[in-house]
Image (cartoon, helix red, strand yellow):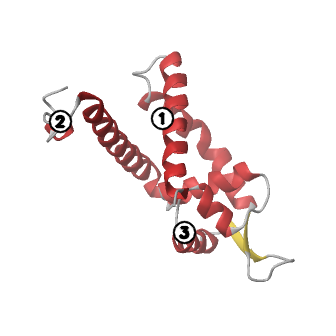
Amino acid sequence: MSSDRPWLEQGLAALPAPLAARVRLFRLAVASGAALRNRLDRSMAATGVTTQQAALLQFIEACGEAPSLGAVAQGLAMTHQNVRQIAAALERKGFLQVEVDAQDRRMRRLRLTDQHRRFWSQRNPDDFARVQDWTAGLSDAEVAQACTLLARLFASVRAADDAP
């Protein structure tokens, strides 16, 4: 591996090659996630919306309705408390409303606002172009393969979370 990333190989020489490769994959995934999050946080800093907040908003939008706070927490692999804190910040900013469920008053539902829709309709073209730039080192086929593999990795991690 590259000598400009000594942390990537730290302690792997003594491991069997298949295990070393899996640890290397884990390190690269963590480092890539952190780097992408930092880039997105910097690009969105002026808006007051963080990467975590944006992810939560995009997840809710993908649900197509007002999902429960618990469903969002489960879907994003976050704690209920963390989602509640992020939702409260987004509600203060006018991006969503936290509503009591009509059938179960203990449940909270997250509903997107018109401000959310206007915000993303203005941002998405530039954000999508930025993502294109950040992933330009990969061919279309490699992007498709990476998506498939990362989805399988995510499913494997989620299954491990559900194991006794």
Q: In which quarter of the image is residue 69?
A: bottom right
Q: In the drawing, what numbered circle is on residue 14?
A: none
Q: Nearer the viewer, mark 1 or mark 3?
A: 3
Picture residue at 56% right of the left edge, 72% below the top: 89
Q: Residue at position x 48%, y 28% from top?
A: 146
Is residue 161 shown above or below 99?
above
Q: Residues within 10 Å of mark 3 (few under 14, many from 20)?
A: some
**In this view, the mark in front (2 or 3):** 2
Tell which residue pokes out farthest to the bottom in this image: 105
Q: Give the distance between the C-alpha atoms of the residues marked 2 and 3, in whole angstroms.
A: 36 Å
Q: Which amino acid does label 3 sit on?
A: Ile
Residue type pointed to by label 2: Glu
Q: Provide residue 105's location: percent of width, then percent of height.
A: 79, 83
Q: Which residue is drawn at 60% across and 36% down?
A: 125
Quadrant showing the N terminus: top left
- Camera-side residue of 75 and 46: 75
In three-dimensional space, the C-alpha distance between marks 1 and 2, rounded to whole angstroms, equals 30 Å
N-terminal of the two: label 1 or label 3? Answer: 3
Dots 1 and 2: beta carbons under 8 Å? no
Amino acid marked by disc 1: Arg
Q: Which residue lies furthest to the right in this view?
A: 103
Distance between mark 1 and mark 3 Cα atoms: 24 Å
**Kind of element beneath mark 3:** helix
Number of dots carrying numbers: 3
Location of mark 3 (residue): 86
Mark 2 residue element: helix
Q: Which of marks 1 and 2 is in front?
A: 2
- Pointer 1: what residue? 130
Q: Is mark 1 on a helix, strand or loop?
A: helix
**Residue 9: assigned label:** 2
* Horizontal side of residue 22 vs 98, given as left or right: left
